[in-house]
Image: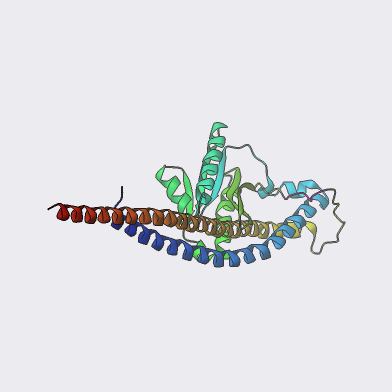
Amino acid sequence: MATLREIRRRITSIKNIEQVTDAMRVVAAARLRRAQENITATRPYADKLNTILAHLISQMDTQEQALTHPLLEERDLKHVCVISVSGDRGLCGSFNSNVIRTTTQRIQHYQDGGADTTLICIGRRTHEHFTRRGYDMTDGYVNIFRQLEFQTAVDIVHEFEELYIDKKIDRVEVIYNNFKSAILQTVLVEQLLPLVPEEPEGDTLFLDYIYEPSQVELFEMLLGKHLNMQMWKVLLDSNAAEQAARMAAMENATQKAKELIDELILQRNRARQTQITTEISEIVSGASAQEGN
């Protein structure tokens, strides 16, 4: 059984940990608010851009005009580029491990189908994990979430876009944590190339707009912007999801620390009671011995 001094030391140590985890929870909550504002402001623009592209493809004079574009070209899968987006730090629950597990499963899926895979790792956790295990990696982006910039998304898109146009890869997928709410983040696997604009939900029909410049020119101009915005949305989603996961993890850690402190206080009180009872018994025994003499 632990001594009274050891229990007191443990209580002091856990109280210090509780203060740290609670401070980290407050910081994560503040960062989450800013990240949530950013992704909320970006999603409507990215979704509308996707809708416009889908409309352009459906309304072009001939589908061949769109489908002959190299970024929409469907190919036999021989080489797949997987973009894995994690965080740079831990202490955020299963946020990083979920992405790593899903990425490993997707790589195995393509390898079982006879396709080679290459990785672009965004975030220190995925970069270190797959580097240590010898995976084929094209590039890695670490510490970008300290100061997230749109140019980073442009650089990433430029990298895999060139590989796709040069036919060095036949598909590009991104795996990341999608931010749903402060208590819900889900891992998504999305195809970036070949580009497949999402169809409108339900039975929504496209209106026959008059475009200026022409549909083909507008289509060419918007393709690059669309990829940049989709990649930017992925980074913002992942950043918001990471802060939400860290806030929840630190809140749970703080609560567990409080529960452990309560248990240790009970142990301390029992130890003190036992110590006092022992001392009283010794005093009574000593007094009885003197009376006998």
User: In the rendering, at what x and y percent does residue 80 appear?
Assistant: 57, 42
Q: Nearer the viewer, residue 272 or 152?
A: 272
Please tell me which residue is depicted at 31% across the width and 50% down the height of the picture. Answer: 2
Look at the picture and state if 134 lies above or below 236: above
Mark yes or no: residue 221 visible: no
Please tell me which residue is depicted at 57% across the width and 51% down the height of the picture. Answer: 160
Residue extending farthest left: 293
In screen coordinates, is 174 left or right of 24?
right
User: In the rendering, at what x and y percent does residue 116 appear?
Assistant: 53, 38
Q: Is residue 201 magenta?
A: yes
In screen coordinates, is 211 left or right of 223?
right
Look at the picture and state if 159 lies above or below 168: below
Please tell me which residue is depicted at 76% across the width and 55% down the height of the picture. Answer: 51
Q: Nearer the viewer, residue 267 or 111?
A: 267
In screen coordinates, is 163 left or right of 18?
right
| Residue span colored magenta | 197-202
Q: Is most of the magenta stretch helix, strand or loop?
A: loop
User: In the rendering, at what x and y percent does residue 248 appear?
Assistant: 54, 56
User: In the rendering, at what x and y percent does residue 205 appear?
Assistant: 86, 52
Q: Nearer the viewer, residue 289 or 270?
A: 289
In screen coordinates, is 166 left or right of 71?
left
Q: Quadrant of residue 221?
A: bottom right
Question: Looking at the image, what colour scheme do you see?
Answer: rainbow
Total of numbered circles in the picture? 0
Q: Nearer the viewer, residue 239 or 264?
A: 264
Mark yes or no: residue 57 visible: yes
